[in-house]
Amino acid sequence: MLWTDLATYLSDDILVKVDRMSMANSLEVRSPLLDHKVVEFMAQANRKQKYTYRKSKVLLRALAERYVPAAILNRPKQGFAIPLAGWLQNELRPWLEEVLLSPQALGRGFFSEPILRKMVADHLAQRRDYSQQLWALLMLEVFLAEQEGG
C-alpha cells in the first residue's frame, strides 16, 4: 500500500498540486524526504520502524525529537484547507443566506427548514463549524437551480 501511495497518489495528486501552487507563487519547493536515498532506505525498513497501530513515521519522529519541540511534534495533523468557514461567515455570507434560505431551496422539502436555519445561524455565530455541510448544500442547490434553468 505504501508503494501504491508513492507511485500514484503522491506523484499524480499531492506533488502536482504542490508544484502548481508553488509555481503560481514563484516559489521553489523541495521535498527532502522524497530524496531517492531516503525512499530507498525506508523501503527496506521493517514495518515497526515505519508505523505502529498508534503512531506513524516512527523513525522520523524519533529523529525529530532531538530537534523539534514536543508541542509541534504532538500537535494534530493539519492540511492546507481553504478558509471556508470564515468565507461563509464574511464574504460569502450574503450568498449563503440568499441561496440556502431562499423560498426555492426551502420549498424543495429535502431538508428540515428549522434544522437548516439553525445550522446557518450556529455557523454564522461561530458556535459550530458547519462549513463543509453548508458548502455541500450550497453546491447542491446551485446545481438544482441550474438544472431548472435559473
Image (tube, grey):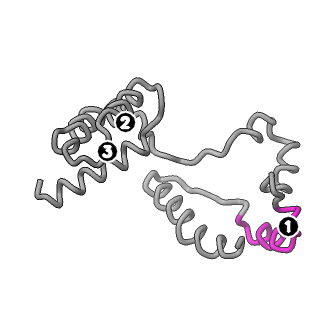
Within 10 Å of disc 1 (Cα), the crowding (few <14, some 14-19, many 20+) is few
Answer with mark 2 or mark 3, whichever residue precedes in sequence: 2
Three-letter residue code for mark 3? Phe
Quarter of the picture holding the N terminus:
bottom right
Q: Marks 2 and 1, how far apart in space? A: 42 Å
Secondary structure of the magenta portion, mostly? helix
Q: Amino acid at mark 1?
A: Arg
Q: CA distance from mark 1 to mark 3?
A: 47 Å
In the image, residue 26 sits, relative to residue 131, either above or below, namely below
Q: Which residues are magenta?
A: 34-50
Question: Label 1 belongs to which residue?
Answer: 47
Going from N to C along the chain, the mark reached first, 1 or 3, is: 1
Find numbered disc 3 in the image and state the secondary structure of the residue it sits on.
Answer: loop
Residue at image coords 74%, 37%: 72
Which residue is nearer to you in this view: 125 or 87?
125
What residue does disc 2 label?
87
Q: Is residue 42 magenta?
A: yes
Horizontal side, residue 96 vs residue 4: left or right: left
Cα–Cα span, label 2 and label 3: 23 Å
Asked if the residue at tag 3 contacts the one at tag 2, i.e. Cβ–Cβ closer than 8 Å, the answer is no
Q: Secondary structure at mark 2?
A: helix
Q: Is residue 18 magenta?
A: no
Instruction: Determine which of the numbered discs, if any, sits on residue 80 in the image.
Output: none
**Badge 2 amino acid:** Trp
Mark found first going from the N terminus, 2 or 1: 1
Tell me residue 141's x, y (percent).
25, 50
Residue 64 point in image, percent of width and height: 83, 47
Nearer to the camera, 65 or 132: 132
Residue 111: give its label.
3
